[in-house]
Image: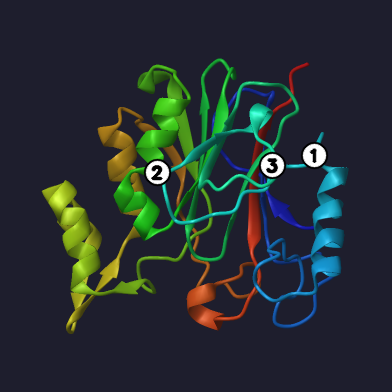
């Protein structure tokens, strides 16, 4: 199993992992480390892929039913498969996870490592405030929080309509800098939009954000590129006993 370790100044006991598409058991077009049960892959194979995480995680991750919304689950009290697009934890060895294949995973923790979280930020969730709601749920001073932006579709590949741009501009006119006109459509910079939201929320230490799932087919799934494809996992937990 191949994965990326976020490069950010988090406390040592804050553990974070970003999986790639490499090192699993799924067959084309889900090859090979697919964690999504909802994309048409053989469920038995997906479960085997998820079981591979047991070698690196202290417990079974809290898998979510993601809806492109803003609901934040508390991992230590979650039951079954909560409908949510973010998850936070204050308990040791409780693993938060979101799945993506172009949408942006936003990792968060505080300086002391007392709380950690992960948000699934596609454009809908991002526009609706999933980052801000996750940060508020962490109940920590914004200046004490830091973020790492994981693999998402890059600004040269994410084409959207004018209606998407208008949604962001209604919230903040500065969002215009994240859109570049291309004919009647726009190229959207998901990373810049996320940075703007984080900074407005008072979170200024932001790392990562230099990937493109759409162009890096060797490492990443991309729904925009392939249609039928798998899902990667973004995981965070506190290891302190």
> Secondary structure under badge 1?
loop
Query: Horizontal and vertical percent for residue 193?
Result: 30, 51
Q: Mark 1: give few (<14), some (14-19) or many (20+) Cα within 10 Å.
A: many
Q: Which image quadrant for residue 118?
A: top right
- In the image, taking residue 39 as reference, residue 71 lies left or right, namely left
Q: Compared with residue 158, is residue 117 higher up or lower down, i.e. above or below?
A: above
Identify the mark nearer the N-term, 3 or 2.
Answer: 3
> Secondary structure under badge 2?
helix
Residue contact at pointers 2 and 1, CB within 8 angstroms: no
Q: Residue at x 42, y 37 (%)?
A: 206
Q: Quadrant of the N terminus?
A: bottom right
Q: Compared with residue 104, is residue 220 higher up or lower down, i.e. above or below?
A: below
Q: Judge by depth and name the residue closer to the eye, 171 or 10.
A: 171
Residue with the mark numbered 2: 130
Q: Which image quadrant for residue 145?
A: top left
Total marks shown come to 3
Query: Horizontal and vertical percent for residue 3?
Result: 71, 53
Q: Residue at x 79, y 41 (%)?
A: 60
> Secondary structure under badge 3?
loop
Residue with the mark numbered 1: 57
Identify the mark nearer the N-term, 2 or 1.
Answer: 1
Q: Quadrant of the C terminus?
A: top right
Q: Mark 3: give few (<14), some (14-19) or many (20+) Cα within 10 Å.
A: many
Q: Which image quadrant for residue 90?
A: top right
Query: Horizontal and vertical percent for residue 75?
Result: 64, 32
Q: Residue at x 43, y 19 (%)?
A: 144
Residue with the mark numbered 3: 62
Q: CA distance from mark 3 to mark 2?
A: 18 Å
Q: CA distance from mark 1 to mark 3?
A: 11 Å
């Amino acid at each position: 199993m191949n994965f990326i370790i976020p490069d950010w100044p988090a406390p040592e006991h804050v553990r974070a992992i970003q999986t790639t598409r490499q090192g699993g058991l799924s067959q084309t077009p889900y090859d090979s480390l697919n964690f999504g049960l909802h994309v048409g892959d053989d469920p038995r194979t997906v479960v085997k892929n998820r079981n591979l995480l047991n070698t690196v995680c202290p417990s079974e991750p809290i898998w979510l039913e993601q809806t492109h919304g803003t609901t934040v689950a508390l991992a230590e009290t979650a039951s079954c498969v909560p409908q949510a697009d973010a998850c936070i934890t204050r308990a040791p060895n409780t693993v938060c996870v979101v799945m993506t294949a172009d949408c942006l995973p936003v990792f968060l923790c505080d300086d002391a490592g007392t709380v950690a979280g992960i948000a699934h930020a596609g454009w809908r969730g991002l526009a609706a405030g999933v980052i801000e709601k996750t940060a508020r749920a962490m109940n920590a001073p914004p200046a004490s929080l830091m973020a790492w932006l994981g693999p998402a579709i890059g600004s040269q590949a994410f084409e959207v309509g004018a209606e998407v741009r208008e949604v962001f501009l209604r919230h903040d006119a500065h969002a215009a800098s994240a859109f570049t006109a291309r004919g009647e459509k726009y190229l959207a910079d998901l990373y810049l939009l996320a940075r703007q939201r984080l900074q407005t929320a008072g979170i200024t230490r932001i790392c990562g954000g230099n990937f493109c799932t759409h162009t890096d087919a060797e490492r990443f799934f991309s729904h925009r590129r392939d249609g039928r494809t798998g899902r990667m996992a973004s995981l965070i937990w506190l290891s302190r006993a």
